[in-house]
Amino acid sequence: MTAPAPSTAPASGVDAHQHVWKIGQHDYFWLKPEMAICRDYDLDDLRPQLGGIGGTVLVQASPSAAETEFLLAVAAASGGLVRGVVGWVDLAAATAAGDIAALALRPAIRGVRPMLGFLETDWILRPGVQPALQALARHGLRLDFPARPRHLPLLPELAQRHPALAMVIDHGAKPAIAQGAFQPWARDIARVARETLAFCKLSGLTTEASPGWNDDELRPYVEHLLDCFGPDRLMWGSDWPVVDLAGGLTRWREACLRLLPTALQPAVMGETALAFYGLRAANVH
C-alpha cells in the first residue's frame, strides 16, 4: 500500500471509542495514582479537541453496572454528542441474560464490554459465559472485544459458536509496537478478519508504540489492519483520555489522516462506526 497524499479531515466523523470517568465514584482499579490520567474527565475536557468529530461512542472503563448508569446519564446530558454507550454486564453471572435484556431496553446502549485484559485468556469461551453471549445476540447488542494478541486465536471459535453476535476488536488487539512485534499478531489478526465477520477499531495504537512514535512506526500496523478488514470493517477511535498518555487525540487523529488513503477516510473515520453500532447518520453533524 502506498502512502496517501496529505489530506484534511472529513467534514464530520465519529469517535468510536472514548471514555469519561470520576475517580473515586467507580472502581477504576487499573488507574494508578502515578498515572497522568488519574483524574476526573468529562465531556467538557473533550469538546475543545473534537475538530471534525460530530459524534462519539462512550465505552465503559469500570466493571460495574453503576458506571454504566453514569455513562448513560452523561450521554443523556451530552446535547447529542454521545450517540451510543458500550456498558458493562457481568457476563459470567447467573443473572446475566436478564441483566442484558433489561439493558437492551435503554435506547443509548449499543453493546457491552468485558474487561478481558484482566481475566484469564480463555474466559470468554467458558461455559458459564455462553448464555450471556447468546443473550447479547438475541437482543441485538454488540460485543466490544478488548483483545490482546493472546486472545486472537480464540476469536474464530467464538464467532463459530455465536454467528449472530456482532463483535468489534478494540485497539487492533494492542500489538506490541514499541518492541517491533509484528508477528504473530499480524498472522493471527489476519486469520480473524478472514474467518469471521468481526470488525476492528483503529484505536489504542499509540500507547503501545514508543514514547516518541512517528508515522513510520505506526504505518505497518495501520496498513495491515486496513488490508485485513477493509474500510467497511475498520473504524477509528481516539481512546481518549488514555491517548493523552501518548501524544493526545489530535496528534493521533492527524496521523491516521496521513496514513489512511483519502478515499477511504469517510468510512474509517465515521461511516463504519455508524453502521456497526446502528447509529443514525442524521445524528452526526
Image (tube, rainbow, N blue to C red):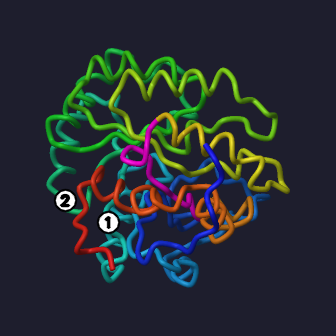
Picture coordinates of residue 130, whole percent (x, y):
28, 22
The kind of secondary structure element at disc 2 is loop
Relative placement, left or right, of 158 versus 139 is: right
Whether 70 is among the magenta residues is no
Task: For marks 1 and 2, give the CA distance.
Answer: 9 Å
Picture coordinates of residue 29, whole percent (x, y):
61, 48
The kind of secondary structure element at disc 1 is helix
Residue situated in front as seen by the camera: 169 or 222: 222
Disc 1 designates what residue?
A: 72
Relative placement, left or right, of 229 versus 187 is: left
Q: From which residue to which does the magenta span run?
A: 229-240
Picture coordinates of residue 201, whole percent (x, y):
48, 47
Whether 230 is among the magenta residues is yes
Q: Residue at x 36, y 56 (%)?
A: 273
User: Given the current orientation, which residue lies at the most extreme right position?
Assistant: 212
Q: Residue at x 33, y 31 (%)?
A: 197
The amino acid pointed to by label 2 is Arg
Q: Using the rendered view, name the quadrant where residue 139 is placed.
A: top left
Number of residues whose C-alpha sits closer than 10 Å to that of mark 1, classed few (under 14), some (14–19) or many (20 or more): many
Q: Are marks 1 and 2 in contact (CB under 8 Å)?
A: yes
Q: Using the rendered view, name the quadrant where residue 91 is placed.
A: top left
